[in-house]
Amino acid sequence: SPFYRPGTTIPEPVAREREASAAGPIDVSVETMPFESALRGALLRLADRLPSYEDELRDLDAALGDGDLGLTVSAGVAAIAARVAQLPRSAATSGLLREAGTAFASANPSTFAALIGGGLLSASAVVDDTRPLDRAAVIAIGRAIAAAVAAKGGAQLGDKTMLDVLVPVLDRLEAGASADELLSYLAERVEEV
């Protein structure tokens, strides 16, 4: 891409997120549950770990695209963490997905941000907030994300996109694979794609 130069970043989305978090908590209209959603902790752990891969994601994306994936992911998960931190600990899973999708999509004006944000928003509609997350709920969330990414991005299996990793992992999860089996398979799929 003529706009990508190795070593460059666009600090604006991160600066916007810092300004938003410095403003303090805001009123939220997210339903709550009598228990804490496991998704809350998962989103915060993801936001803690993914930024360490920013350079690797940028370099991989630069080989095939415009090189903005590392920044998109880092800014997106930072925005998710800031938003989730403002929500009640008992925020409903659907609300967490909705707020995470909005935060990720708003953090950076990229196609990937729009696809992930839209996928999370679609997933928020399939969650049963009256129950804790279980395998079936995780599969439904993953399938909703995959369907939204395919529909909005025009991708399909075999196009060497995130769908070529996500869909087969969901298939294995649905078939009863253990966490160790999924992690091993996931590592293989990422290398293949």
Image: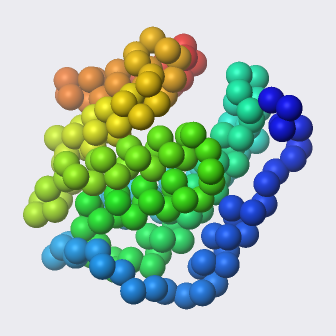
Which residue occupies 71% across, 41% down?
Answer: 68
Which residue occupies 39% across, 64% down?
Answer: 99
Classify 4 as above or below 102. Answer: above
Which residue occupies 67% across, 78% down?
Answer: 19
x and y percent of residue 9 in the render?
82, 51
Q: Camera-side residue: 97 or 12?
A: 12
In screen coordinates, is 10 left or right of 100?
right
x and y percent of residue 112 in the render?
56, 40
Classify 152 as above or below 93. Answer: above
Q: Is residue 81 visible?
A: yes
Classify 93 as above or below 32. Answer: above
Q: Is residue 47 visible?
A: no
Which residue occupies 49% across, 15% down?
Answer: 159
x and y percent of residue 132 in the render?
17, 59
Count of numbered marks? 0
Q: Which image quarter: residue 40? A: bottom left
Classify 13 as above or below 25. Answer: above
